[in-house]
Amino acid sequence: MESLLSDESRQLAGILFLALVTVETGGLYMVRIVTGRERATPFQEKFARAGHAHAGVLLVLALVCQPFVDATELTGIWEWLARTGVAVSALLMPGGFFFASMGRGRTEPNRFILMVFAGALLLAVSLTTLGIGLLTA
């Protein structure tokens, strides 16, 4: 039986589905915050919500990208960007929100906020690469 996905897409999709389970369990932390069982400043609650939302959405977007990368003729670094860049941004951006708000009583982000911007840049470059790859295939 012929596979609908390349081996690369199938393997990364498997990893991404497993990663979504970690986002689900991270939702328990959000429940503890909003029910008052976990102490957090309003700033920390906002960043926890942003990190959690970005993690889920970007992992799903990374899954959506896989069959589209297979439909391109991209190779090398361009294929890596299109196939893996969104998944890496799904680590960088949420990680930036979480790490930038860590610490008792924090009311503003620390330097880890740079991870959010690095992830956003990688996301833009990856999606642009995939879009161009699809238009030129």
Image (tube, grey):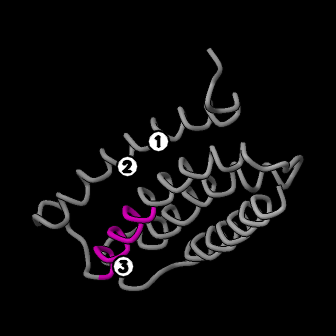
Secondary structure, mark 2, is helix
Percent from the top left, x then y, of residue 106?
36, 79
Secondary structure under the numbered disc 3 in the rendered image: loop
- Give residue 32's position: percent from left, percent from top: 17, 58
Residues at discs 2 and 1 in contact (Cβ within 8 Å): yes
Q: CA distance from mark 2 to mark 1?
A: 7 Å
Q: Residue at x 20, y 64 (%)?
A: 33
Q: Where 108 falls versus 46 (above or below)? A: below
State the residue position of label 3. Answer: 106
CA distance separating discs 2 and 3: 23 Å
User: Where residue 54 sits in the image (x, y, percent)?
Assistant: 44, 65
- By secondary structure, the bulk of the magenta-drawn segment is best described as helix
Give whichever of discs 2 and 3 has the lower sequence position: 2
In this picture, residue 110 sits left or right of residue 41: right
The boundaries of the magenta stretch are 43-54
- Disc 3 marks a residue whose amino acid type is Arg
Q: Is residue 55 magenta?
A: no
Direction from residue 97 to residue 136 in the image, left or right: right
What residue occupies the far top of the structure in this picture? 1
Residue 50: within the magenta?
A: yes
Amino acid carrying mark 1 in the image: Ala
Q: Image point 52% across, 78% down: which residue?
A: 110
Closer to the observer: label 2 or label 3? 2
Which residue is located at x 46 percent, y 38 percent? 17
The residue to which callout 2 is attached is: 23
Amino acid residing under circle 2:
Val
Which residue was labeled with disc 1? 19
